[in-house]
Image (cartoon, rainbow, N blue to C red):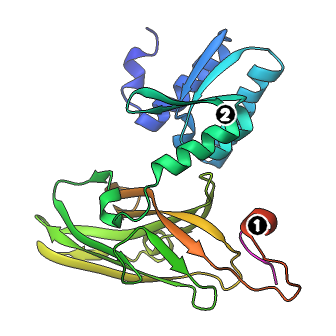
Amino acid sequence: KFIDTPVKRYSSGMMVRLGFAVAAHLEPEILVVDEVLAVGDAAFQNKCLGKMEDITKSKGRTILFVSHNMAAVERLCQRSVVLEDGMIGFQGEVGEGVAWYLNRSRPEGSKIISGIEQLNPEFHIDEITLNGSPLNQVPLNADQPVLNVSVKGRLSEPKRVALEVRLFDNKGTLLAFYSPGHLHGQLYDLKQGSFEITESIIFPGNITMGEYYLDIDLTHPNVEYYMRIPKHVKLMVTGISGTTGLELKYEQCGFLMLK
């Protein structure tokens, strides 16, 4: 009761952080943690993981951890349950559960536009292409590491818009962030009617071989998300070539080969 009125003044992210702090310090026998890592900065997320590890290992309590962050799931959990359409789709070992989830959540051969999960009602998106293709599987050669992004649509009212792209590995670990809006203040002043946003993302030539996943968003930076496509696009990178005959893969070498 004591948090009922004050909490209404906080953002949803602050409410989640406050709720986790209160619940964790009450020392319950079973702690249910639902998407707490979706808010806050890296320091807060690390504190959450550290606290949950302490609760389970040193205090012997149970945590039901709900998350789309596969790296955190593998770090924290001993058993996994994957829900599909409200039913149990998989139950068992964590590594197998992660693989099952990843294979089901990223349909291959579909259009990029079909991955839109959030769209402002004043926007209509007609087409999204990467390197000229509307499909969500995109090859990228380390010799020509450029990703050309095109978003075409219509607006019912003028908006200030920026393109943002985030790059993840197959377990949901964030590897890179493309955002001219944050870095340079580069935004489009779009008028009512048809629009087209085209930008080229230049990847480093020393990127390693692997399969990566993209978030593609239209935003007003630090203000509002207009369109969100989370991890629907698979980027298949051939990677930099080595002279020793060893394939320089992400799993063994990391994201970049240092020079």
Give left or right: position of 7 versus 55: left
Give amino acid for label 1.
Gly
What residue do we see at 19% from left, 62% from top? 123
Residue 39 seen in this snapshot:
no
- In the displayed structure, 115 sits above or below 185; it is above
Earlier residue among tags 1 and 2: 2
Please provide percent x and percent y for residue 113: 30, 64
Query: Closer to the observer: label 1 or label 2?
Result: 1
2, above or below 183, in the image: above
The picture places residue 251, in percent across and down from the top left corner, at 75, 62
Q: Which residue occupies 48% across, 74% down?
A: 138
The quadrant in which residue 156 appears is bottom left
**Magenta region includes residue 205:** no
Locate the C terminus and report the quarter of the image it occupies.
Answer: bottom right
Residue kind at label 2, given as amino acid type: Cys
Q: Which residue is mark 1?
A: 254
In the rendered structure, the answer to whether residue 199 lies left or right of residue 154 reads right
Which range of residues does the magenta coloring cover? 254-259
Left or right: where 35 falls relative to 164: right
| Residue drawn at (66%, 40%) of the image | 96
Q: Residue at x 36, y 79 (%)?
A: 133
> Badge 2 is on which residue?
48
Asked whether 156 or 111 is in front, the reply is 111
In this picture, residue 44 sits left or right of residue 130: right
* Tag 1 secondary structure: loop
